[in-house]
């Protein structure tokens, strides 16, 4: 299992379009991937789950992946969330 705390740097935070894109990124991997914020944990491959988090720019989220490609999954999710433009 791989865990990493990531600060969201997307200018608009995680609104509908960035969430859809993040779910696409997460869905490329076989690993189970979850995001946790304020005590709530959701499946990163679920658009509805991700929308319940309501994350904004500057907030921190804990990304957890468990599976054969967990490190690559966490690295690419971090890359996506760290985009400043």
Image (tube, rainbow, N blue to C red):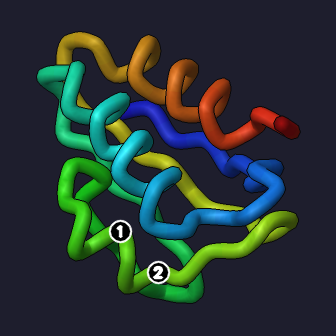
Label 2 crowd bin: few (<14), some (14–19), many (20+), radius 10 Å: some
Identify the residue at image location x=51%, y=51%: 18
Q: Residue furthest left?
A: 30
Left/right of residue 18 with respect to residue 57 in the rendered view = left
Label 1 crowd bin: few (<14), some (14–19), many (20+), radius 10 Å: many
Q: Residue furthest front?
A: 17
Which quarter shows the N terminus? top left
Quarter assignment of residue 61: bottom right
Image spot of residue 28 (x, y percent):
22, 21
Mark 1, residue position: 50
Query: Tag 2's secondary structure?
Result: loop
Image spot of residue 44 (x, y percent):
31, 52
Mark 2, residue position: 53
How many numbered markers are drawn?
2
In space, the residues marked 1 and 2 are separated at their CA atoms by 6 Å
Quarter assignment of residue 81: top right
Image spot of residue 64 (x, y percent):
41, 46
Look at the picture and state if 36 lies above or below 53.
above
Query: Tag 1's secondary structure?
Result: helix
Look at the picture and state if 46 lies above or below 23.
below
Image spot of residue 38 (x, y percent):
58, 87
Q: Check contact, mark 1 vs mark 2: CB within 8 A.
A: yes
């Amino acid at each position: 299992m791989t865990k990493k705390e990531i600060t969201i740097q997307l200018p608009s935070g995680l609104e509908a379009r960035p969430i859809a894109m993040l779910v696409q990124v997460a869905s490329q991997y076989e690993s189970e991937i979850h995001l946790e914020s304020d005590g709530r944990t959701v499946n990163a491959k679920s658009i509805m789950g991700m929308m319940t988090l309501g994350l904004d720019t500057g907030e921190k989220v804990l990304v957890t992946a468990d599976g054969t490609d967990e490190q690559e999954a966490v690295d690419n999710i971090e890359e996506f969330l760290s985009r400043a433009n």
